[in-house]
Amino acid sequence: MATFIAIGYGDRVGYDSTDGAVRDAAHAHDERLREAGVVMGTAGEPVQVRNHDAAGARTDQGPFMRSDLPVAGFAMIEAADIEEATRLVSGTPCAVAQGVVEVWPLARP
């Protein structure tokens, strides 16, 4: 099995414009993923950390990356391949409620 990081992007406007039954099914899908062992959570406020040349850490509030939609949450998924990981996240709230989910393979040295 390989490990994948899923990053969900979405906003309240897209979520609220999605049919309630579709949203409910997406939340039930997430619950099944959690029961299967997927580590998942919603995103809080980020902090940037820099320690260039190990000269001392500096932190700044807020995200470094920018996108049209805010980061809504993260998941760590074990799957056979990226196609399976993609299938697993395709029913999550961000994917169905007018947002997007990125799936990143996590390389292990």
Image (spheres, grey):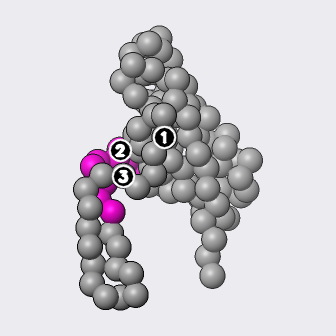
Q: Residue at x 50, y 23 (%)?
A: 97
Residue that numbered label 1 is attached to: 67
Q: Nearer the viewer, mark 1 or mark 2?
A: 1
Which quadrant is home to the N terminus? bottom right
Confirm whether the magenta stretch covers residue 45.
yes
Residue that numbered label 3 is attached to: 63
Which quadrant is home to the C terminus? bottom right
Q: Position of residue 53 (x, y in %)?
A: 40, 87
* Along the line of sight, the residue nearer the viewer: 59 or 105: 59
Label 2: element kind:
strand
Q: Amino acid at mark 3?
A: Pro
Residue that numbered label 2 is attached to: 42
Q: Earlier in the sequence, mark 2 or mark 3?
A: 2
Q: Quadrant of residue 58?
A: bottom left
**Horizontal placement of 34 versus 62: left or right?**
right
* Along the line of sight, the residue nearer the viewer: 98 or 56: 56
Range drawn in magenta: 40-48
Label 3: element kind:
loop
**In 3D space, how far apart are the residues under numbered discs 3 and 1 (Cα atoms)?**
10 Å
Q: Is residue 24 above or below residue 82?
A: above
Q: Local crowd at mark 3 within 10 Å, few (<14), some, or many (≥20)?
A: few
- Are the two marked residues, 2 and 3, in contact with CB atoms closer than 8 angstroms? no
Label 1: element kind:
loop
Q: Residue at x 66, y 44 (%)?
A: 86
Q: Amino acid at mark 2?
A: Thr
Q: Amino acid at mark 1?
A: Ser
Q: Earlier in the sequence, mark 1 or mark 2?
A: 2
- Are the two marked residues, 3 and 1, in contact with CB atoms closer than 8 angstroms? no
